[in-house]
Amino acid sequence: MNSSSLTTLFCSMKAFDGHNAIIQNNALDNWRYVPGVTVVLLGNDPGTAEAAQERGFLHIPDIAVSEYGTPQLNAMFAVAQAAAVTPFVCYINGDILLPKDFAETVQAVGRDFEKFLMIGTHWKVDITTRLPIDGTTCNTTALLREYKGEKGAIVGIDYFAFPTGMIDYMPEFYIGRPGWDNWLIWESKRRSIPVVDVSAMLTVLHQNHGYHHVPGGNGRDWNSGPESARHKEIFKAYPEFDPWYGTILHATHKLTSTGFHLAEPPPDLRHALIRDAQWKALQASGILSNLRQRVVEGV
């Protein structure tokens, strides 16, 4: 591993075929040129070993998976933290493009907080070709202008940075299935761990993709199939948890150009949802059905 690294990025990739191969290779090429990061690829989907070897990334193939081959997040978090030699680690989805100052921002948060969970919004972009990424073209702000992206939903979070060893427990969630990211924010707040929103400082891009990879799913979203149903069963052990109480709006702190600030408590949830630009799209998501009913009924 790079001795100058500050943060270990870890993730699990889908099989490198079709559009997934394009956007995952774009992400890996991007991470390669983000200063201060080391990358660990977990799991053994087709193409992962080759992608890691090509870029000199650490590859750990043996990760607990479901009977459908989907990696378990609790295993990923445990293995990545055990392997990391950096002070910070960051779970990241395999389709994300990062700005050059990502690790520097993680370090800035770490200077002010002994424990923290760093999160942020993303911008959704449609990219269908390999990007010519190198050390001088790793510019997410320019890419956002070129591809005319739109801001992602407040309920979806694509990266979590935190001090190595901090997250020592997680239920048997599966990567890419609903609600676990919102649970992690909710659980961190329940444990009095600061949740720091750095959206104002980082331009992070999400390369849009389909959901035909979800086992037993409907092909349109991540909220279908037997693994999604298992998440809903897990959530029953946390009766106070609601995915809408673990969103970007629920960070405890924000980092802006003027420093760290206490985040204002989120407004009434119904009003927040009405204002959110993604509300119409999110209405179609099954995970929001109970919340949608409460909004309609005015409860």
Image (cartoon, grey):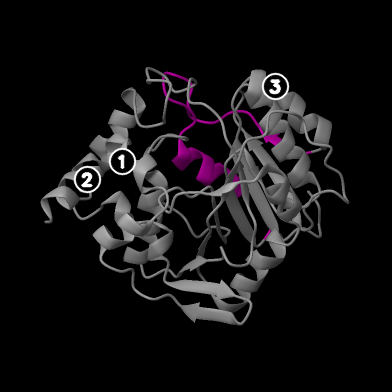
* Residue 17 in view: no
Q: Reply yes or no: does residue 63 show up in magenta.
A: yes
Question: Which residue position holds label 1?
Answer: 283
Q: Quadrant of the C terminus?
A: bottom left
Question: Residue 292: which disc?
Answer: 2
Question: Which residue position holds label 3?
Answer: 47
* Residue found 43% across the figure and 21% down from its top: 219
Rendering coords of residue 163 (x, y %): 57, 62
Q: Is residue 86 above or below residue 206?
A: below
* Residue 186 in view: yes
The answer to which quarter of the image holds residue 171 is top left
C-beta proximity under 8 Å, tags 2 and 1? yes
Q: Secondary structure at mark 3?
A: loop
* Residue found 44% across the figure and 23% down from its top: 214
The answer to which quarter of the image holds residue 250 is bottom left
Identity, as a three-letter code, of the amino acid under mark 2: Arg
* Dot placed on the residue nearer the N-terminal end, 3 or 2: 3
Q: Is residue 229 above or below residue 194?
A: above
Identity, as a three-letter code, of the amino acid under mark 1: Gln
Q: Secondary structure at mark 1?
A: helix
- Distance between the alpha carbons at the discs numbered 3 and 2: 40 Å
The stretch in magenta equals 57-86
